[in-house]
Image (tube, helix red, strand yellow):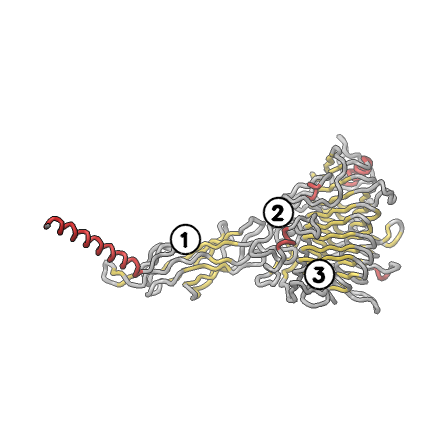
Amino acid sequence: MQESRLPLGATTLAAFALAAVPLALAAPRAAAATTTLTVTTAADPATTACPATADPCSLRAAVNAANTAGSGSTVIIDFAVAGPITLTQGALPVNNGEDLTIQGNTAGSTVIDGGGSDRVVALSGGGCNPTVVSTLTLSHVTLQNGHAQFAGPDDGYGGAIDVNCADVLNLVDSTLAGNTANAGGGAINDNTSAPVTVVRSTISGNRSTGAAVATPPDGGGGIELSTAGTLTVIDSTIAGNDTAWSGGGIYAVTGSTLTLVNDTISGNTDSGTPAGVTATGGVYAQANLTTSVANTIISGNTPANCSGTLTDSGHNLEQGTSCGFSSHAINADPKLGTLQDNGGPAKTMALQPGSPAIDAGDDTTCTANPTASPPGAGGLDERSVTRPQSAHCDVGAFEVVATTTQLSAPTTATPGQSITLVATVSPAQAIPGQPTGTVTFLDGTSVLGTAPLSGGSPDTASFSTTVPSGGTAGLLARYEGSPDFLPSTSPAQPPAAASPTPSPSGSAGGVIAAPNTGASPPPAGAALLAAVAGAATLAAAFGRRRRRRNA
């Protein structure tokens, strides 16, 4: 997948820039020199030096070096090696008060694999020492195949990431997929009193099996949000996760704070909840927690989308009523596509043509600064497509891109003549991929026919037709849209003259007017009246001159 790389620093507000909008997730620390370590091997040896002149630098060695730098240090880890990197020595520990950014490659090739035997990252601040607080920012990475087992030092929480104490986690433009927790939080266990923020990321295909082993039981196939935790999810997709307790997507417990802005939560399941527990595939919210849900799709989760009480901040969509949405709410099928590569660093669920989520969002929410209260989506979707693309922002993590359609037709033609119409469809914003589907060609309101887009550059569709005997009523082309791109219609060509004009052979003919230049052509009779009026004025003037001569 190709996408524009948004640079992320490790130290200050710019570390979470949403376009030109800084996303401040925690108070910036005092300025510190930044150390950059580059990973040069996909191996995971138990011991290695990093940086070093003789030895290759592994990811584990780079993380250990960041830990050694300790409290107050700022470290960026980047990659000169293609993934996947499979961990063989257990989870990567981030635990000594550093400000660490792990910055993957924008091509989406930086995959960190837990190997199925341990979680991928353990973020715990020096034994919960309040003076030793680590901040971890993960950008443009995929964490997969982690397994938090309920045994030994690994307590079974957070299959991909376990964040504890007062440590800070920022997940940006990344994917957590295929991870498992034997307790709670198939992808993330949010057990910190500090903010955990997920921006433009996808959490999919993770599972928690907590009912079988945890006491008390835990859920959250995607994320478990524990007491006193603060979780903010913006422009992100949570899809296809499963739990054996409750909250296939998110499980939030009493005392926590949950904020959802322009997210898509769909296709999550609760496959094993025992009797007496409310089975919930989407979001399980216990009593007495703080929530805010805005511009978000929670739909298509099994057996229910929501349980508990969610604070409806407006413009949400659910096919059903379990979430209790009422403020500018939409109860309808969102018409989501499958989770797939639609451009950007992570897979997304596109809005299909005719989705009620299109243009149904609140513009203030989707364009507001993410640091506002309540936070906004920063004017971007999960793929960093600008919002809004049309009249209003779309609901959910995906914004359908606007298009323009231009029609090219011959400037003149006679009735009965065959002509070729060519429509060119262009996206309003360049993203990977291009418009697909069909273009409908019309003469006024009458459909002449349809043609598929070529898929070339420029992206065109061609259609041949015959000029009717009475001329045309006004030719135009209408692009019908696709899951990634909005429909659009070309400006209409002006009508052709209805009166035939003799041809050299004596047969009748007609003329199609030139393409529309933006000015309305005068009615056919107006030109004739103007000519008559001009002739009358000239004759009157000539007569006055003759009378003066004869006088």
Q: Quadrant of residue 219?
A: bottom right
> Which amino acid is tagged 1?
Gly
The residue singled out by tag 3 in the image is 312
Disc 3 + disc 2, Cβ < 8 Å: no
Q: Position of residue 54 (x, y in %)?
A: 76, 31
* Label of residue 423 in the image: none
Q: Residue furthest left?
A: 550
Side of 393 relative to 178 (left or right): left
* Of pointers 2 and 1, the one earlier in the residue sequence: 2
Q: Residue at x 86, y 54 (%)?
A: 150
The residue singled out by tag 1 in the image is 518
The residue singled out by tag 2 in the image is 2
Q: Position of residue 454 (x, y in %)?
A: 49, 55
Side of 130 relative to 433 (left or right): right
Dot 2 falls on a residue whose secondary structure is loop
Q: CA distance from mark 3 to mark 2?
A: 35 Å
Front residue (pair 466, 377): 377
Disc 1 + disc 3, Cβ < 8 Å: no
Q: Position of residue 271 (x, y in %)?
A: 78, 65
Dot 1 falls on a residue whose secondary structure is loop
How many neighbours does mark 3 have within 10 angstroms: few (below 14), some (14-19), or many (20 or more)? many
> Which amino acid is tagged 2?
Gln
- Residue 453 can be seen in this image: yes
Q: Residue furthest bottom?
A: 275
Q: Quadrant of residue 530?
A: bottom left
> Which amino acid is tagged 3?
Asp
Dot 3 falls on a residue whose secondary structure is loop
